[in-house]
Amino acid sequence: MKLSTRALAWTSALLWGGAVLLTGILNLVWPKYGVAFLDTLRSLYPGYGATSGFVGVIVGTLYALVVGTICGALVAWLYNRFAKPESAPTA
């Protein structure tokens, strides 16, 4: 069975982007929420500042969408490359 590279790329982009968006919004409401996670993202994503308000949340989400897309596509490609091909059923 092969994985759809496009489907896994979209899925991981939406999941990772959604997680960053949700954490950023919750941090705006409760400033102590997800601080360690957002600080980690700040160290990974150049120009991203978790404490720069809603614009910072959008910038972080855009970074996460791009990274999620690339990672999802890479995982699907690697899986398809190394998975054993299915043998055809014999009649």
Image: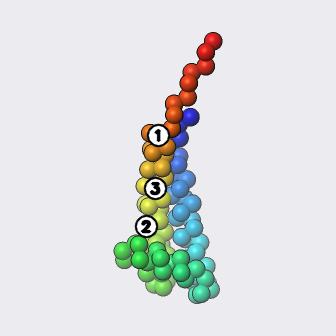
Q: Position of residue 64 (x, y in %)?
A: 47, 65
Closer to the camera, 69 or 36?
36
* Callout 3–callout 2 Cβ contact below 8 Å: no
**How far, Cα to Cα, is label 3 from label 1?**
16 Å
Residue 63's label in the rendered image is 2
Q: Residue at x 49, y 69 (%)?
A: 61
* For marks 3 and 1 on the same chain, the one whose residue lies earlier in the sequence: 3
* For marks 1 and 2 on the same chain, the one whose residue lies earlier in the sequence: 2
Q: Which residue appears farthest toward the left when viewing the image?
A: 46
**How far, Cα to Cα, is label 3 from label 2?**
12 Å
Q: Position of residue 40 (x, y in %)?
A: 47, 76
| Residue 37 to residue 18: above or below | below
Residue 91's label in the rendered image is none
**How far, Cα to Cα, is label 1 from label 2?**
29 Å
> According to the image, label 1 marks what residue?
82
Q: Residues within 10 Å of mark 3 (few under 14, many from 20)?
A: some
Q: Residue at x 59, y 72 (%)?
A: 22
**Which tag is nearer the camera, tag 3 or tag 2?**
3
Q: Position of residue 71 (x, y in %)?
A: 46, 55
* For marks 3 and 2 on the same chain, the one whose residue lies earlier in the sequence: 2
Q: Amino acid at mark 2?
A: Tyr
Q: Amino acid at mark 1?
A: Phe
* Callout 3–callout 1 Cβ contact below 8 Å: no
Can residue 20 be seen from the camera position used here? yes
Q: Residues within 10 Å of mark 2 (few under 14, many from 20)?
A: many
**Which tag is nearer the camera, tag 1 or tag 2?**
1
Q: Residue at x 61, y 79 (%)?
A: 26
Can residue 55 be seen from the camera position used here? no
Which image quarter is the N terminus in? top right
Q: Amino acid at mark 3?
A: Cys
> According to the image, label 3 marks what residue?
71
Closer to the camera, 17 or 39?
39
